[in-house]
Image (cartoon, coloured by chain):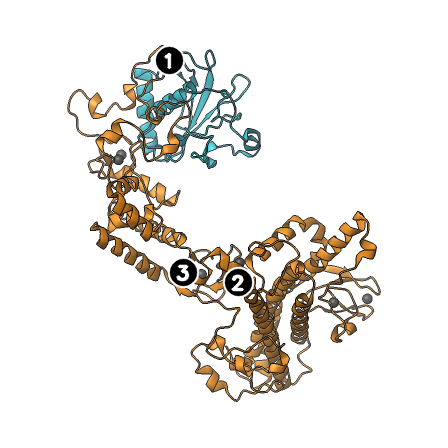
Chain colours: A cyan, B orange
């Protein structure tokens, strides 16, 4: 079945495997067209020097018309970065994953954007209302309606 | 309105004599007030003339979707004419400013190109693009002082000492990355079999298939009435003719899109409200309730016109008739009921014990007059008092006796007294609600009775409608009664409240009377007697309901009601 989604993901995967990921990003797993895993670190002098995070992309059949579900993985090995737009369960409040998603954006583009979101961080802190959010958060971050125009959610 | 139920000249014998005159009135619903007997009213209840609207009924219009579309088209045409732009452009401008024509005209006259850019009609000028100030979505700027473009644009580099090579791989097919001229491939699907490409005024080309999928998703999943270009960060909005052609033969999605635009038009206009009933497309226009300040004096209950059951409040989200009480008090009461639901839950239960023999009694009709099967004790379901006392004037089941100071001295008995007080009102509120529901059951019983009547008498179908009419009236009045308890709970003690409760008691007694008659055995009655009795009682109940609604509505207009709590808009 040559849906837009699988053709597009095959194309992106080919590029990643032949030309490599952007610097600081490594592909960990892309066995299917539903879930991809990456490791991500921020190079240079940033608050996250030496830290490595794991990113999970989940795609539905509407990708890239609709955005992928992207979050940091929190498990025995990995933690979500402490950042004003990243909840402790790994959910990210970033407008490009929500209302500013464009079908032209790609997995690599999202990785680079998140990298620069971390790089530009001035204070390591959790978003306001983190505990409250995490307690009631849906499994899929796309089900959350983030308000990007709020003072604390500008990405 | 069946002519049997018009008020006749004589308060005791409701004659049918002037049926024909009534039926020729233009507004059937507002007929015959002048026939009411003045003695039955208290002094300040003035009987309105035939032409006058009842105080508790408000002025409104119902509009079909087509009518709303016409009004919308008129606004678009108006703007299109003034600005000298296409209708599709005028429509986008209006949507951008929430259909506020005056504001749009003012802003457009001030700076047409700025408005056009903000509304997504024309691309920003070169200089503003290169500054990457992202004028459209200012909230996307980062907190770190970097330009917002840097966050969204994957081709930007990560700051820091080690500079990564530009990830050109992101757009391998972008013109700048293509070394030799190749046939254009859609940068979304990379499907090289696509041959048809579309773009908005910004010239961002994508294949027709991607446009179709994107627009469908925006319309179907996100319900958007202004859909931006697919290119990253591009704020150009697709005008309607583009949406129409890109959706090709997907007519249902195009129709859904038009509906979304209409809904936005309606939602932006404070004097319009969409009928909240599922899949109904009618709109109500009610300018008198457009301002919140009006809601302290009127209860704007409207009906969409598509169906008589589509009744809702124009002023608040309650999707039912909550007259006679105003929106803010109704809302306060519902919140209190929600908050105290656990305390009060037992009240709602369908079974109680007979106060004389303690056997369990189940309520299965709408009537409150209970007779214990075992000991034949007759009592009131609501207050559990003997029924014999309910017929006499000194007994008031509806009124809560506010106990004075003595036993409310310590905090504990105070809080118990306040709970008891609440339960008094809640009990009656819940009972009328439940009884109104039980009237559905009652109606099926009634229908059977009517069939029986048709068989056993020479009455026609039309002639046995008096039973249905009676049941409908009972349900309507129980709705009124239900809300009078919400209102009485918050009314300040005093003469006005006593008058209110007198009206409430009279209506309640009339309703219970009719309820009881409707549940009585039919075979012992001669049909014509029953018909006369039910008709008479229905007319009386209707009249009591009118008085209750009218007097309360006038009280709001006259500022006669004061509250024992602080209520929005009252000081
Ligand atoms: Zn395409
Ligand atoms: Zn564009
Ligand atoms: Zn309706
Ligand atoms: Zn209301
Ligand atoms: Zn008994
Ligand atoms: Zn009683």
Residue that extends furthest to the front in the rendered view of this protein: B571
- Circle 1: element type: loop
Mark 3 residue element: loop
* Residue B44 falls in image quadrant: bottom right
Q: Can you tell me whether the CB of the residue at mark 2 lies under 8 Å from the nearest atom of ligand 4?
A: yes
Tell me the element at label 2: loop
The mark nearer the N terminus, 2 or 1, is 1
Quarter of the picture holding the C terminus of chain B? bottom right
Q: Is residue B239 visible?
A: no
Q: Are marks 2 and 1 on the same chain?
A: yes
Query: What whole-number distance in Å separates the C-alpha atoms at marks 1 and 3?
Result: 59 Å
- Mark 2 or mark 3, which has the lower sequence index? 3
As rendered, which of B529 and B148 lies closer to the eye? B148
The image position of residue A121, as x and y in percent, is 44, 20
Q: Position of residue A65 (x, y in %)?
A: 34, 35
Which chain letter matches label 1? B
Give the residue at mark 3: B282
Q: Which mark is residue B160?
A: 1
Report whether B424 appears left or right of B232: right
Q: CA distance from mark 2 to mark 3?
A: 20 Å
Q: Are marks 2 and 1 in contact (CB under 8 Å)?
A: no
Residue B57 percent across, percent down from the top left? 50, 68
On the same chain, marks 2 and 3? The answer is: yes
Residue farthest toward the bottom in the current orientation of the protein: B17
Marks 1 and 3, the one that precedes in the sequence: 1
Q: Residues within 10 Å of mark 2 (few under 14, many from 20)?
A: many
Quarter, ligand 2: top left
Classify 10 Å Cα crowding around label 3: few (below 14), some (14-19), many (20 and above).
many
Q: Mark 2 highlights which residue?
A: B299
Is B212 left or right of B63, judged from the image as shown? left
């Amino acid at each position: 079945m040559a849906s837009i989604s699988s053709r597009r993901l095959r194309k992106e995967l080919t590029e990643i495997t032949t030309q490599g990921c952007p610097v600081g990003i490594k592909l960990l797993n892309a066995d299917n067209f539903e879930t991809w895993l990456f490791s991500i670190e921020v190079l240079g002098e940033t608050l996250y020097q030496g830290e490595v995070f794991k990113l999970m992309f989940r795609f539905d059949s509407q990708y890239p018309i609709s955005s992928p579900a992207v979050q940091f993985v929190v498990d025995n090995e990995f933690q979500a970065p402490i950042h004003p737009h990243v909840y402790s369960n790994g959910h990210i409040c970033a407008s490009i994953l929500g209302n500013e998603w464009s079908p032209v954006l790609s997995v690599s583009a999202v990785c680079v954007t998140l990298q620069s979101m971390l790089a530009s961080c001035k204070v390591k802190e959790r978003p306001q209302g983190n505990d409250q959010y995490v307690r009631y958060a849906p499994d899929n971050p796309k089900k959350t309606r983030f308000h990007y125009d709020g003072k604390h959610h500008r990405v | 309105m069946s002519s049997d139920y018009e008020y006749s000249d004589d308060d005791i014998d409701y004659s049918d004599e002037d049926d024909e005159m009534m039926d020729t009135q233009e507004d059937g619903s507002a007929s015959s007030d002048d026939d009411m007997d003045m003695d039955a009213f208290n002094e300040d209840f003035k009987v309105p003339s035939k032409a006058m609207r009842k105080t508790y009924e408000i002025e409104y219009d119902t509009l079909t979707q087509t009518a709303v579309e016409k009004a919308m088209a008129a606004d678009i045409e108006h703007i299109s004419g003034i600005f000298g732009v296409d209708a599709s452009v005028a429509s986008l401008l209006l949507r951008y400013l929430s259909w506020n024509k005056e504001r749009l005209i003012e802003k457009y006259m001030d700076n047409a190109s700025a408005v056009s850019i903000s509304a997504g009609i024309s691309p920003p000028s070169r200089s503003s693009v290169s500054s990457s100030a992202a004028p459209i979505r200012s909230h996307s700027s980062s907190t770190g002082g970097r330009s917002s473009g840097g966050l969204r644009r994957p081709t930007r580099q990560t700051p820091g000492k080690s500079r990564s090579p530009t990830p050109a791989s992101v757009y391998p097919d972008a013109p700048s990355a293509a070394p030799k001229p190749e046939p254009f491939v859609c940068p979304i699907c990379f499907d090289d079999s696509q041959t048809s490409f579309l773009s908005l005024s910004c010239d961002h080309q994508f294949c027709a298939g991607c446009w179709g999928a994107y627009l469908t998703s925006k319309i179907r999943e996100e319900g958007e009435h202004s859909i931006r270009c697919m290119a990253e960060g591009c704020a150009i909005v697709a005008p309607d003719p583009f949406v129409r052609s890109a959706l090709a033969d997907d007519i249902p999605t195009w129709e859904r899109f038009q509906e979304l635009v209409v809904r936005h038009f309606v939602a932006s206009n404070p004097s319009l409200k969409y009928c909240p009933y599922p899949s109904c497309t009618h709109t109500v226009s009610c300018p008198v309730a457009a301002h919140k300040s009006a809601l302290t004096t009127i209860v704007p209950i409207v009906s969409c016109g598509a169906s008589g059951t589509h009744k809702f409040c124009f002023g608040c989200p309650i999707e039912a008739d909550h007259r006679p009480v105003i929106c803010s008090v109704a809302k306060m009461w519902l919140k209190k009921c929600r908050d105290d639901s656990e305390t009060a839950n037992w009240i709602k239960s369908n079974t109680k014990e007979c106060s004389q023999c303690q056997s369990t009694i189940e309520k299965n009709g709408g009537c409150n007059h209970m007779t214990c099967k075992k000991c034949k004790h007759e009592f009131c379901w609501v207050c559990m008092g003997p029924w014999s006392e309910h017929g006499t004037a000194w007994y008031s089941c509806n009124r809560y006796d506010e106990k004075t100071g003595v036993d409310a001295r310590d905090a504990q008995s105070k809080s118990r007294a306040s709970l008891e007080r609440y339960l008094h009102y809640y009990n009656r509120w819940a009972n009328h609600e439940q009884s109104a529901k039980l009237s559905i059951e009652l109606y099926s019983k009634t229908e059977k009775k009517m069939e029986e009547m048709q068989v056993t008498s020479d009455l026609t179908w039309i002639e046995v409608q008096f039973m249905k009419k009676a049941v409908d009236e009972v349900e309507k009045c129980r709705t009124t009664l239900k809300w009078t308890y919400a209102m009485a709970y918050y009314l300040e003690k005093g003469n006005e409240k006593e008058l209110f409760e007198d009206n409430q008691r009279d209506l309640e007694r009339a309703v219970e009377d009719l309820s009881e008659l409707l549940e009585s055995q039919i075979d012992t009655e001669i049909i014509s007697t029953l018909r006369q009795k039910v008709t008479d009682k229905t007319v009386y109940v209707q009249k009591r309901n009118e008085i209750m609604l009218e007097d309360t509505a006038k009280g709001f207009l006259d500022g006669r009601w004061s509250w024992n709590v602080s209520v929005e808009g009252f000081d």
